[in-house]
Amino acid sequence: MAPIKLALVGLGKIARDQHLPAIAGTQGLELSGIASRHASVPNLAHWTTIDDMLASNADIDAVSLCTPPQGRFAQAKAALEAGKHLMLEKPPGATLSEVQALEALAKAKGLTLFATWHSRFASAVEEARALLSNATIRSVTIEWKEDVRHWHPGQEWIWQPGGLGVFDPGINALSIVTRILREKFYLTQSDLFFPENRAAPIAANLDFELTGGATLRAEFDWRQTGPQTWDIRVETDAGQIVLSQGGNVLTVNGTEQAHPSGQKREDREYRSLYGRFMQLMAAGRSDVDLSPLTHVADAFMLGNRHAVETFEDTP
């Protein structure tokens, strides 16, 4: 069977660190070209823009779109209009409505659209979901705190409208809890902390309520230095379940759980994304879950805005 020929649009840090090795490690997938204004890969076809790529009539079956969310809609629409299956790096768009429009277009064209949430593929997430499937939830606490200077150096788009600010990592936590909790939850309180010189928040404290009445508290902060914190704690009638290290370590009632296979846990999030993309294309299906982005939109809608000190990339 001939491999799926894929083009990567956008070659920034996340594409180099995660997408390129994941594509190389996915059987049946062949990287056929790069569209990027400022970067290329040796021995691969290169175009400056996605429009140039599509106009070239290159042999491409699918596109993985890794550009910032602002302005992405036009690129995604062009790919679908050209008959290409499409995978979207998170967040899938700058607004909910634009992704819904893309979903409708993909359906009309008979194409696969995959709005990805890489943290859902962290190695302990599905184990936590299984443990919580019959549990009574008493409370949930998310603590997602990291150093923006380390993870997003010089990336101005994250501070602009549509860039999400601290919700760029925070949405990873929301993508996990919307996967592992069987109950829906909704926002009741939002406090957003905006640097005086930025259009997006650097920190956020959110309170939610599950439909069964339990509480969910999320604290996101981009100002943490030293060890980084990516923890989700769930108190249940059977005790405590903790997902740490971004969903890659599972602790139950104080005891860290080994991987069911007995093997060492690995970071396979992006390879799993491409495996899922391959499955969706083979089945002629799409996967567009907007629940994490919906919670972020709600946080802005209910947000109490608080001004904090200015932020610069260099301390």
Image: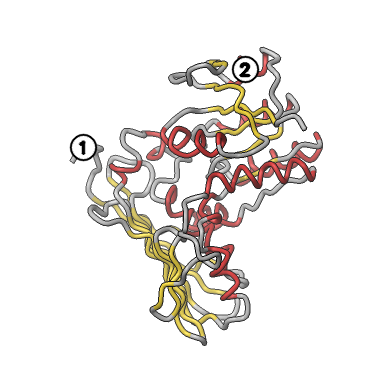
Point 55% across, 64% down: residue = 261
Pinpoint residue 223: horizontal percent, then vertical percent: 27, 52
- The answer to whether 315 appears left or right of 178 in the picture is left
Nearer the observer: mark 1 or 2; the answer is 2
- The answer to whether 227 appears left or right of 245 in the picture is left
Instruction: Identify the disc placed on residue 19.
Output: none
| The quadrant where residue 242 appears | bottom left
Residue 118 or residue 294, whichever sits in front: 118
Quarter containing the C terminus:
top left
Question: Type of residue at label 2?
Answer: Met
Residue 161 or residue 27, whichever sits in front: 27
**How many marks do you count on the picture?**
2
Pinpoint residue 31: horizontal percent, then vertical percent: 60, 27
Question: Type of residue at label 1?
Answer: Thr
Point 25% across, 42% down: residue = 311
Instruction: Identify the disc placed on residue 53.
Output: 2
Instruction: Identify the disc placed on residue 314.
Output: 1
**Local SS, label 2:** helix
Residue 201 or residue 142, whichever sits in front: 142
Point 37% across, 40% down: residue = 159
